[in-house]
Amino acid sequence: MKDFIQMVAKRSPLLLVAVVMISSGACVPSEESYTPPEVTIIQDIPAGNNIPAREDPVLVEEDEEEGNIFEEEIPEEPEEGEEETSIEEEIVEYGDWTGPMLSHIEATFIVLPHPTESSFQAFCTFEGCYLSPRLYHHTLGDGTVFIGYTDMWGDGHVVKVADGLVVQTWDFSMLEIKGLYAHEDESFGVLTLGCDLSISGPCATMWLETYDSAGAVSEVVNLRRGSSIPVFDQAGVEVGGSRLTFGGNHYAAYHTAYKSGHHGDQLTYISRDGVIASGGWSFGCSHSMSQGINYNPFLEQFMPICVSDKYPATGVVSYNSTLIYEAGSDESGKISAVLGQVASTESGWLIAFNAVDRPCCDAFGIGLATIDSSGFPTALTWLTGTDGSIERDSFLARLGDGNYLAGWRHAINPTDEYWLGVMDNKGNFILGPDQIDDTSSLETRRFWGRDDDPGKTDVNGCVSWVATGQNITDLGYYKVCPPEL
């Protein structure tokens, strides 16, 4: 059956299904409504916990031809006889950590066998934007890396990388890759999205495919549940995303789902031998604009997080039930907060997100929410002290025994800035945050994808991420390890 699906399923029928569904009720505003909201810059806002206040970029008045742009203030020239200090030269010490942050990033550059997919339009922070190609990766304890992606022709691929070289490839003809998790024995699970023409009605289908340590397929599990179908597209705009993780001998697949004219999300638990377990839901947060999920080994449980523009609440929500942070929304796809990443603590989870200040809901850029084992919020710390106009794509992953690698992107024309640092579980930075990007080339740049769930923690406590551009084969692999490793 699976061979038949791979032979007949094509990307174009999926798009056709999405277009037909769009006519039944759009939840997405028209193209001309994508302009960002007017935001008043809040003055004299204190920076987040223990973060030294810094000068923020100056908002330049709107120009009829150029539109709103951000311009950095020009730093003062050093006085005569005073040496200028670069980011690489600034040394900061805290415990075992010595700065700058950039010195802790190990970079490897990989050539993929096929060029990546194109960027695509999506909903972002109360605006429309373009997201980078979707990348999914997992690093094993011995340094072997598994990477999943979709190429520019719509075919999916999983590659195994050792010492920076692709040593094995799995190809998924006419199927998109939507999630990946690899195990220490080199077996792995992968989410694939395609079209099952054997069913009546809309054919969009998500599968979990598992492969054994020898690289052979073990199980193929159809994840369609009732009338909920995995259609992400709405009038050419992507809604939400997809995530795959593993814990307690079960995979957890969490992704956008479409039903009755609206985009919600679906959560499915699948045992390692391919049996769908109890729990989860076929249609949860709605409209589900971004999703994340993390398995906590201390509590032995999963935590699904969504950002919803209406149901069950407007903002960042846990377990499809509990409001963590209230955001502004037009209930039609625009939302003033976007989920970054979810990371476990000994007693719960940390959640990173970005938010822009709105009349309903105070925001200061990058938020760090703490929740307990039931998903209820216990603390909210702002890692930045602005109105959220430029902070995007927050990064969060557990690093070693109790610290966290945290960062975000500054959306500043003409070139973005990426900031990264090491913090404790209260949001107090012990190194950085420092600007880490160098945009002269892929080989020197340190960055991550947009709304891409980038940071992943391996069994050694190191954090890795991958990044690339559209329609290219070059890929950057980056890793930060605790000082003791």
Image (cartoon, grey):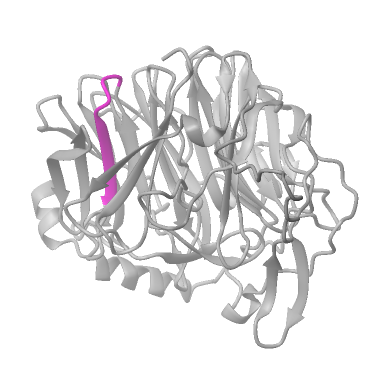
Image: 52 above or below 401: below
310 horizontally vs 154: left or right? right
Residue 458 position (above or below residue 438): above
- Residue positioned most to the front: 81
Location of residue 80 in the rendering, given as x and y in whole percent from the top left corner = 74, 50
Please name the residue shown 32% across and 29% down the image. Answer: 139
Instruction: Give the quarter of the figure containing the C terminus.
Output: top left
Residue 319 on image: x %, y %: 59, 33
Identify the residue at image location x=55%, y=33%. 101
Q: Position of residue 157 (x, y in %)?
A: 21, 49
Q: Quadrant of residue 133?
A: bottom left
Number of numbered labels in the structure image: 0
Q: Using the image as rendered, state which of residue 255 and residue 294 is in the foreground.
A: 294
Q: Is residue 148 covered in magenta? A: yes
Please give the range of residues in magenta.
141-149
Residue 430 vertical placement versus 366 (above, below): above
Nearer to the camera, 478 or 439: 439
Residue visible at 55% across and 71% down in the picture: 26
**Residue extending farthest bottom:** 64
Residue 373 appears in the rendering: no
